[in-house]
């Protein structure tokens, strides 16, 4: 396999959503990201420096040497979306993954309502991976999972957490969770509220919060309180930070209930 001008152009085009959809491909960059994801996705091409190929024989063999292209780091830098040229770039096929609503009903699921920032989405996926949440449902107007910035921000967690896009209200209804939780500035203190081991946790848009249509489905409104009470603070928490805090409290309750 050779790095032709047409292949170079094709890989660079994957920075744009329309071409990711057209080709059904996305890009992962950097040694850690590729090492963590190569077993989870079908690899169309692996571009790497000679030293990286030599040091990662197991990955190269798993991909298949016919799909590996040796290239200098300067060349990878011309293709990469990163500021610092990586040693390796993987081009993966976007998998088909249908939501299993029945399985999701027995889990803790995160729902994203119009979360716009790719970095926030990637960090949320990473937090979900850490706290054992493997299913995320997202509104169609949320950030794209396969955006290079999202993929990079997941730090490999994209291999273990599945994100399903669609009509968010319809997906929540299909799951029919025991409870639908949401974070609000006028909610109940999360640290004083009963939390279940299953359910859907809704996180809203960075600036506008949870939409009215989805808010009407929430039956447990939660607040992450600032400390100490009454002290002037920032207007709100970053959505990725709020997701991590919320999941930590849910898992903390599960751990305590077992002791």
Image (cartoon, grey):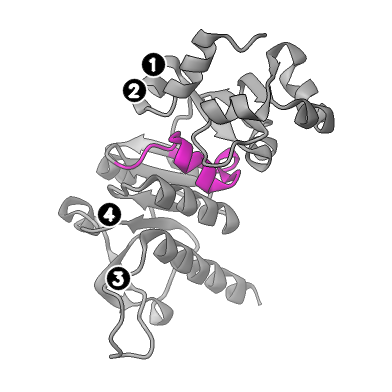
Contact, CB < 8 Å: mark 2 with mark 4?
no
Q: Which contiguous range is marked in magenta? A: 142-163
Q: Name the residue under label 4.
A: 205
Q: Mark 2 and mark 1: span between their CA atoms?
A: 6 Å
The earlier-in-sequence mark between 2 and 4 is: 2
What's the residue at 57%, 52% (across, down)? Answer: 129
Relative side of 26 to 71, left or right = left
Instruction: Inspect this view and state whether residue 98 appears.
Output: yes
Q: Of residues 224 and 180, which is closer to you in this image?
A: 224
The earlier-in-sequence mark between 3 and 4 is: 4
Which element type, helix, strand or loop, lies under badge 4? loop
Contact, CB < 8 Å: mark 3 with mark 1?
no
Q: Residue 236: which numbered mark, if any?
A: 3
Which element type, helix, strand or loop, lies under badge 2? helix
The earlier-in-sequence mark between 3 and 1 is: 1
Q: Residue 22: which numbered mark, if any?
A: 1
Q: Residue 79: which numbered mark, if any?
A: none
Q: Mark 2 points at which residue?
A: 18
- Image quadrant for the C terminus? bottom right
Q: Mark 3 and mark 1: span between their CA atoms?
A: 38 Å
């Amino acid at each position: 396999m050779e790095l032709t001008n047409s292949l170079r152009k094709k890989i660079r085009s994957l920075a744009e959503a329309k071409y990711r959809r057209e080709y059904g491909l996305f890009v992962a960059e950097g040694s850690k990201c590729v090492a963590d994801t190569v077993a989870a996705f079908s690899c169309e091409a692996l571009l790497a420096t000679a030293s990286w190929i030599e040091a990662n024989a197991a990955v190269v063999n798993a991909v298949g040497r016919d799909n590996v292209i040796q290239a200098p780091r300067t060349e990878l830098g011309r293709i990469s979306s990163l500021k610092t040229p990586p040693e390796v770039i993987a081009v993966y096929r976007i998998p088909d993954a249908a939501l299993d609503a029945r399985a999701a009903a027995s889990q803790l699921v995160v729902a994203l309502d119009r979360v716009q920032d790719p970095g926030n989405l990637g960090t949320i996926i990473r937090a979900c991976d850490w706290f054992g949440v493997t299913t995320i449902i997202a509104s169609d107007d949320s950030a794209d999972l396969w955006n290079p910035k999202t993929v990079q921000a997941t730090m490999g967690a994209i291999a273990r957490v599945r994100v399903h896009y669609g009509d968010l209200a319809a997906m929540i209804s299909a799951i029919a969770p025991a409870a639908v939780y949401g974070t609000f500035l006028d909610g109940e203190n999360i640290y004083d509220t009963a939390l279940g081991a299953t359910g859907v946790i809704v996180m809203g848009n960075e600036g506008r919060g949870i939409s009215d249509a989805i808010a009407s489905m929430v039956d447990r409104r939660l607040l992450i309180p600032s400390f100490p009470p009454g002290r002037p603070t920032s207007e709100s928490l970053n959505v990725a930070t709020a997701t991590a805090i919320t999941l930590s409290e849910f898992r903390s309750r599960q751990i305590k209930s077992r002791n």
